[in-house]
Amino acid sequence: MDNIKASNKIFSIEDAKKLSKKRLPKLVYDFIDGASGDEKLSEINSFALDQIRLEPRVLRNVEERKLKKNILGFNYDYPFGFAPMGMTNLSWPGADSMLAKESARNNIPTCVSMASTTTLEKMYELSEGHSWLQLYIFQDEAFVMELLDRAEKTGYEVAILTVDVPVLSRRTRDDKNGFSYPFKIGPKQFFDFATHPVWSISTLLNGIPKPMNYETSKSGKGIFKRKESRGKTDWETLKRVRNKWKGKLIVKGVMSSDDAVKIKEMGADAIQVSNHGGRQLDSASAAINILPFIREAVGNNFPIIFDSGIRSGSDIVRSLALGADFSMIGRPVMYAMGADGASGLRRIVDIIKEETSTTLGLVGLNDINEVSSDIIEQKLFMNTTY
Ligand SMILES: Cc1cc2nc3c(=O)[nH]c(=O)nc-3n(C[C@H](O)[C@H](O)[C@H](O)COP(=O)(O)O)c2cc1C
């Protein structure tokens, strides 16, 4: 009953965010919501998306609207998926399987983080094959190669190499809250958990979330150290991953046109323009403002996926108008599950689908594949830069 009531209170991502703030321990909410340094970039990402105004068009028959998108040769029912996020089960017990099942229900991709709290094999099964695997290269590259072998054997067809964390940024809120892995529970954390009993008891009953791809490493090479340096990752690393992985390869965390062109030349199948939701270089630009430059640099036919700051269906349409082929959503799905588990997630996904469809109709289009920069209000377009 409580579940039904909570979901009924969600009409926007902002509603889900507020509800999750109430339900989750501070340490967990801050891990999800937090960003790096002064945390401004996370807001700037969404603010910059807001600055892009679309032009309403009238007297066009928009009765039928198609949202289906093809990316990397795969047909999906909507132009968005779930971004990779580590330690997802912290947002609510069973969060990984909620994401997997929701991606299967909607025929959209879900990106499984290397630091996922469910094994990549289980995620593939639960998502009925809708999973893409995301990897970081740590000091021990052998573990990454082992995961690529496991992914291939399982049936994965898409791998994502995240390259924007050569150094883990300073996350002030995590430091203040004493967020670490393995979790350390001192008096402060104990009080935080004790004052959020529903989350704490369900988490205890379901087992403390662990990075399960590491826990199941057969070679014993997978030892999860969140703060371990990834600084040695370079172009040679990309070459080795490209040689190893025969499926589609996406390089995530690209914010420079020069890098994008080089990544394309090195044989990646797509890039993901992203500033990690403002969680890495805090003085970087808003990802949406860089997207058109990267599109221009790589040309029209090279697939670009976009994330960072998407908070509505209009934001998805905006990102497509500025050159993306597909978008990924990060924190909003974590807020949704923190607010109300699987029902919260379903509610938010349905809201985003509806908003995307409505926006499409209001700019006078019938098919998401027709979205281009023509729908942007040119008279006022972007006089703000970040
Ligand atoms: C809690 C959390 C954990 C994340 N973990 C990962 C990760 O393991 N791998 C990765 O490539 N990106 C990770 N990201 C970044 C997201 O994939 C994505 O780039 C970002 O959240 C998008 O911005 P948004 O949250 O504003 O939508 C994480 C983001 C959050 C919020």
Image (spheres, rainbow, N blue to C red):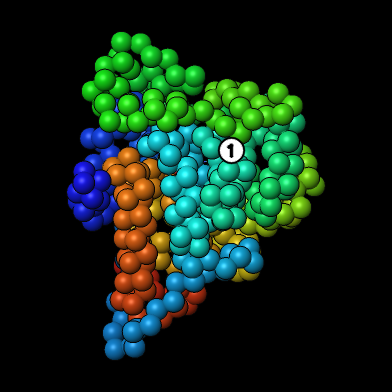
Question: What residue do we see at 42% from left, 15% from top?
Answer: 184
Q: Is residue 19 visible?
A: yes
Residue for point 57% across, 59% down: 304
Q: Tell me where residue 222 sits by quadrant.
A: top right
Q: Which one is nearer the viewer's eye here, 205 or 50?
A: 205
* Residue 343 screen position, x and y as percent: 32, 50
Front in this rendered view, residue 386 or 70: 70
Amino acid at the residue labelled 1: Thr
Viewer-proximal residue among 205 and 167:
205
Q: Is mark 1 within 8 Å of ligand 1?
A: no
State whether residue 334 is above or below residue 385.
above
Residue at 32% x, 65% y is 355
Q: Dot 1: within a 10 Å radius of its alpha carbon, few (fewer than 14), some, or many (20 or more) residues?
A: many
Residue 270 location in percent, x, y? 63, 57
For mark 1, give the secondary structure: loop
Residue at the right extreme, as displayed: 243
The image shows residue 75, relative to residue 15, as above or below, that is: below
| Residue holding disc 1 | 119
Is 222 situated left or right of 312 in this image?
right
Q: Is residue 20 left or right of residue 255?
A: left
Question: Would you say 319 lies left or right of 158 here?
Answer: left
